[in-house]
Image (tube, rainbow, N blue to C red):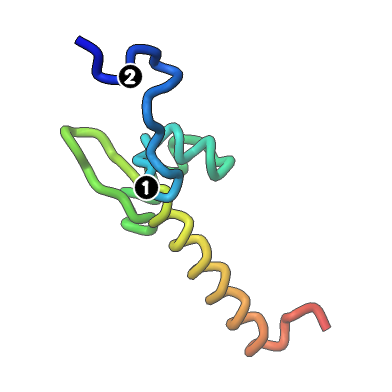
Amino acid sequence: MDNGHENPEEAPIPPPQNQIMTLQQVADYLGLHHLTIYKLVQERKIPAAKVGGSWRFKKDVLDQWIEQDMAQRGSRSGRNGRNGN
C-alpha cells in the first residue's frame, strides 16, 4: 500500500511552532538540565501537560512563555532603574 510516505525522511514534519516536545527535548532546547525542567514543572513555573504519565510541552507555548518572561523582566528593570544606564 502506497501512502506517499514510504521513506521516513520524506514523512511530513510538523511545523516547529506546533512541535510537541519531551522533557529532555525541552532541557536541550533551553540549555538546562532535565532535572531543572522537572523542578519547574513540579512548581508549575513552566507550561506543560502530562500525557500518559510523561510530561509534554508545546514549543510555541514555551517560546511565548519565554517572550512574556523576558518582557516582564525588561519592564521591571526599567521601573527599578536597573536598565544598565
**Observer-nearest residue: 34 or 22?**
22
Which mark identifies residue 31? none
**Observer-nearest residue: 56 or 40?**
56
- Element under disc 2: loop
Question: Could you tell me which residue is drawn at 40 percent across and 33 percent down?
Answer: 13
- Quadrant position of the N terminus in the picture: top left
Q: Looking at the picture, how far across and down is residue 65, in whole percent?
A: 44, 62
Q: Amino acid at mark 1?
A: Asn
Q: Quadrant of residue 56?
A: top left
Q: Amino acid at mark 2?
A: His
Extreme-top residue of the structure: 1
Residue 67, placed above or below residue 57: below
Question: In the shown orientation, is residue 59 left or right of residue 48?
Answer: right
Q: Looking at the picture, how far across and down is residue 69, in whole percent?
A: 51, 68
Residue 3, placed above or below residue 75: above
How many numbered marks, from 0 up? Answer: 2
Residue that carries the numbered disc 1 in the rendered image: 18
Question: Could you tell me which residue is drawn at 24 percent across and 13 percent down?
Answer: 2
**Observer-nearest residue: 71 or 78?**
71
Extreme-left residue of the structure: 52
Specify which label sits upstream in the sequence, 1 or 2.
2
Residue that carries the numbered disc 2 in the rendered image: 5
Q: Looking at the picture, how far across and down is residue 67, in whole percent?
A: 52, 65
Q: Quadrant of residue 73?
A: bottom right
Residue 66, placed above or below residue 6: below
Question: Could you tell me which residue is drawn at 45 percent across and 34 percent down?
Answer: 25
Residue 32, placed above or below residue 82: above
- Element under disc 1: helix
Question: Could you tell me which residue is drawn at 39 percent across and 13 percent down?
Answer: 7
- Quadrant position of the C terminus in the picture: bottom right
Label pair 1/2, CB-CB below 8 angstroms: no
